[in-house]
Amino acid sequence: MKSLNPLDLYNIHGLLSEEERLAQDSVARFVDEKVLPIIGKAFEDARFPKELIPEIAALGLLGSSIHGYDCAGLNGVAYGLICQELERGDSGLRSFVSVQSSLVMYPIFTFGSEEQKQCWLPTMARGEKIGCFGLTEPHGGSDPANMKTHAKKQGGDWVLNGAKMWITNGSIADVALVWAQTDDGIRGFLVEKGSKGFDAPEVHHKMSLRASVTSALYFDNVHVPEANVLPKVKGLKGPLSCLTQARYGIAWGAIGAAQACLKEVLEYTKTRELFGRSLNHNQLVQLRMAEMARKITSAQLLALQLGRLKDKGEMQPAQVSLAKWNNVRMALDIARDARDLLGGAGITTEFCPIRHALNLESVITYEGTESVHQLVIGKEITGVNAF
């Protein structure tokens, strides 16, 4: 009988189309050959490996679900698998691609003018221009309707004032898609790098997502031309629809982080001896690794069904919340347990679990905290809004 893949016990790979398998396999090779050899050092040095951007773009990973505009036009499952493999490398790398694709290119494609699409999408797909997404504010992120950043019409321009916080890609971005209150509701503004009164300082002293750029955004009477306002959306529908796309990718990405941790533990416990035998001969160790495999398998099946729903146009935001909540919690629990199984070796970046555990402390918070997603499901199943 053929032995099972310990990282894919239900043969999810066999349920994929040829295009989906090709997408996963090409990103897996890139992660193995280009990411894993450098990512531990990049994390230690708090350095985003910008040198990887050209190859990420050449593989078609930026805006991969968009049709046209030099984008790959892949389906939702393929995009999920891309996120899974990238986060197997590091959450920071998946965050970079997720922000560029789901939080900047997606809203330009969905809500932008044809001129905005032609201006930004091809160059962003090629990695020549980088974007960031400004929604979260310093006073709190879970209540975006209470945003303080505002824009006032002044002649042919808009004048933007306020601040955003915890912005991935902020200080390397060529354009910030900023959501602000106006007299006509929340609108999206494309604020270009170098605009007078716009500053994007990097956030330092992070113990999580260290191989990722995190910034604040400050707007002091920044003039934004009317041509840089997204014309096809008003209100919270715009930013929330972007978050649904990003959360979808996170639900897949977390699986990759968990798989990386289990793989490390499987290899380590083969060779580490304690009381005269390898650790993997110990019942308690096997039980803990079996529990990891169970959780990963459940998350894989959940993500695949979510992707199939997405590709049929049937995916609902509450379903994405359930997947983000379940899969990130799963990955964080596995990363912590894997770190423990590695003993003292587990606290070094020579092994991946401590890096993934620290990263996942951010992932479980951003794009909706665990509590927010629990309340989304609570509202869905009871019909009562308890926010």
Image (tube, rainbow, N blue to C red):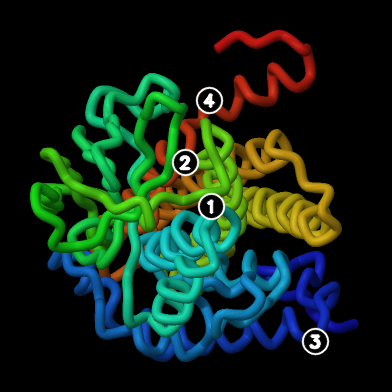
Left or right position of 257 against 67: left
Residues under labels 2 and 4: Cα distance?
A: 10 Å
Residue 107 appears in the rendering = yes
Q: Which residue is mark 3?
A: 18
Decide which of tag 1 and tag 4 comes sooner along the chain.
1
Q: Which residue is mark 4?
A: 372
- The local crowd at label 3, few if under 14, some if 14 to 19, many if 20 or more residues have their Cα within 10 Å, is few
Labels 1 and 2 touching (C-beta < 8 A): yes
Mark 2 residue type: Glu
Q: Position of residue 90 (x, y in %)?
A: 39, 66
SS label for mark 1: helix
Decide which of tag 1 and tag 3 comes sooner along the chain.
3
Residues under labels 1 and 4: Cα distance?
A: 15 Å
Decide which of tag 1 and tag 2 comes sooner along the chain.
1
Residues under labels 1 and 3: Cα distance?
A: 24 Å
Residues under labels 1 and 2: Cα distance?
A: 7 Å
